[in-house]
Image: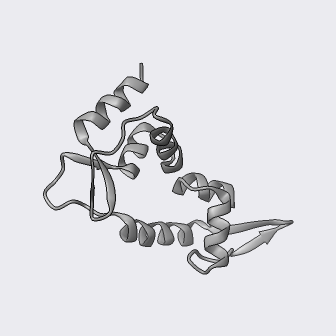
């Protein structure tokens, strides 16, 4: 059985450790399965189940609109956490969203892919 620390989970989900701990305290995320010394550990299976539930809750696919990308999609394609991507947008290092679909900011796929490619040079 594989176990993960809060740091490993936060990195996997693209959130901060503080956000993960808050979600656990509020009951939004699973409680630790065990403790090793002073470190809480979660079972990988529990984290995967939470991740799947979480992704269904926040993923909104614009119907028939594959010409756009969400923050999560761009961050994943660029190898960034969602928080880092949003920080880049706020600071002007990345393009601003073109519009919102169902309350979710989206970017034209072509523009997002161009920005991702420019980072690889």
The one nearer the camera, 90 or 79, is 90
Identify the residue at image location x=36%, y=69%.
56
Residue 114 in sight from this viewpoint: yes
Q: Residue furthest bottom?
A: 27
Q: Is the image coloured rainbow, by chain, by secondary structure, or in one colour?
A: one colour
Front residue of this view, candidates 89 and 114: 89
Residue drawn at the location 45% of the way across and 40% of the way down: 89
Residue farthest toward the left in the current orientation of the protein: 64
Number of labels in the image equals 0
Return the x and y of residue 88 as percentages of the image width and height.
49, 38
x and y percent of residue 75 in the render? Answer: 43, 44
Residue occupying the point 46% across, 32% down? 93
Which residue is farthest right?
37
Q: In which quadrant is the N terminus drawn?
A: bottom right
Residue 29 image position (x, y, % from top left) = 58, 74
Asked whether residue 2 is in view, the answer is no
Q: Judge whether 6 appears above or below 30 on screen.
A: above
User: Residue 104 is drawn in which quadrant?
Assistant: bottom left
Q: Is residue 121 left or right of residue 41?
A: left
Q: Residue at x 59, y 51 (%)?
A: 11
From the image, which quarter does the C terminus lie in? top left
Q: Observer-nearest residue: 102 or 84?
A: 102
């Amino acid at each position: 059985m594989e176990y993960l620390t809060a740091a490993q989970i936060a990195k996997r989900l693209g959130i901060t450790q503080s956000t993960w701990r808050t979600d656990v305290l509020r009951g939004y995320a699973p409680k630790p399965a065990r403790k090793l010394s002073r470190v809480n550990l979660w079972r990988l299976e529990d984290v995967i189940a939470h991740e799947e539930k979480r992704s269904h809750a926040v993923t909104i696919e614009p119907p028939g609109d594959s010409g756009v990308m969400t923050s999560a999609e761009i961050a994943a394609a660029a190898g960034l956490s969602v928080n880092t991507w949003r920080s880049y947008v706020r600071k002007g290092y990345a393009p601003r969203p073109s519009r919102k679909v169902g309350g979710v900011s989206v970017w034209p796929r072509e523009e997002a892919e161009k920005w991702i490619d420019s980072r690889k040079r």
